Amino acid sequence: MSEQIAYCSGPMFSVGDLWEQQNIAAVLEAGGFTTYLPQRDGLEVGKLMALLLDPQISSQVGQIALSIVRKVTYSLDIYQLIGRCTCLVFNMDGRVPDGGSLVESSIAYAAGKPIVIYKTTPITMLAGTDNPMIEGLSTSWTYVHDTVDIVPALQARIEAQQGADYVYTPPPVVGLILEVGASVADKNSKLRQILAAIAAAPTGPDALKEAKALLEWAKTDRAFQAAFGSDHTSFLGPDGRHRMGTL
């Protein structure tokens, strides 16, 4: 079997969530899979958010930079889902399924990726069953209830879909988002270096100085402009002056 890269999709809002996601990734890796774990391999959005929204700095400029960070983070996850990962494990545990993970799983489903749904909670939508639009994402209409069963179930789904005459072709706008995401994933790209500089800033004001390069990148990058809009008025203040003039 060629290299299989599993996207680990699930909630990341508590210590428990983070531990469970890390455990699922470890189980997959022990079973021979490469994994993409957003909390480990993605952008440190929480740190960037804290730096760019520091009350010592201009909230107007910080909001612009944060908006760009959110878009490139989204692009990275779309790239990993469609452009790099070959399969997905959806951790459905929680009071309700995590919204972002539902979107990720739906994208993977539409792109023809093998999916396994992991669920241990007894919580259901109605009469012991879940929303069929969620349950159906597995294509087998079954869940895995123990981590030891994740790898065999995923291998079975991969084998079941092998030989299928299907190649996913992304719509034009998704292709542009994949291009942006590939830039974020490339640790040697200009965009990744800019984001690393912001994250490494010791204080909010220092981060804001580094964010100047991010605003310039967003104004000039063809794929970003085409995917997320080319209206430069979003970078202008009420008086028409470039907001970076406040830096």
Image: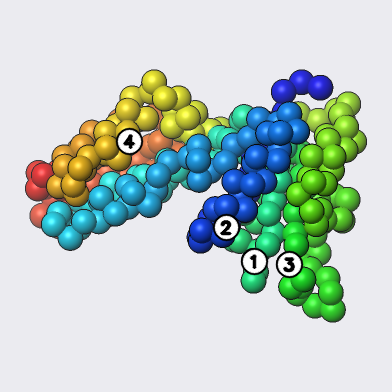
Q: Kindly state the secondary structure of the residue where label 1 is placed.
A: loop
**Residue tagged by mark 1?**
94
Residue 214 in the image: x percent, y percent?
Answer: 27, 36
Q: Are marks 2 and 3 in contact (CB under 8 Å)?
A: no
Mark closest to the chain's N terminus, 1 or 2 = 2
Residue 71 in the image: x percent, y percent?
Answer: 42, 45
Q: Kindly state the secondary structure of the residue where label 2 is placed.
A: helix
Q: Is residue 1 visible?
A: yes
**Badge 4 local density, few (<14 within 10 Å), some, or many (20+)?**
many
Mark 4 or 3, closer to the camera? 3
Residue 74: give its label. none
**Residue tagged by mark 4?**
195
Q: Amino acid at mark 1?
A: Gly
Q: Residue at x 75, y 62 (%)?
A: 120
Mark 4 or 1, closer to the camera? 1
Residue 49 in the image: x percent, y percent?
Answer: 32, 52
Mark closest to the chain's N terminus, 4 or 3 = 3
Residue 17: give its label. 2
The N terminus is located in which quarter?
top right
Q: Are marks 4 and 1 in contact (CB under 8 Å)?
A: no
- In space, the residues marked 4 and 3 are separated at their CA atoms by 37 Å
- In space, the residues marked 1 and 2 are separated at their CA atoms by 9 Å
Q: Nearer the viewer, residue 235 or 206?
A: 206
Mark 4 or 2, closer to the camera? 2
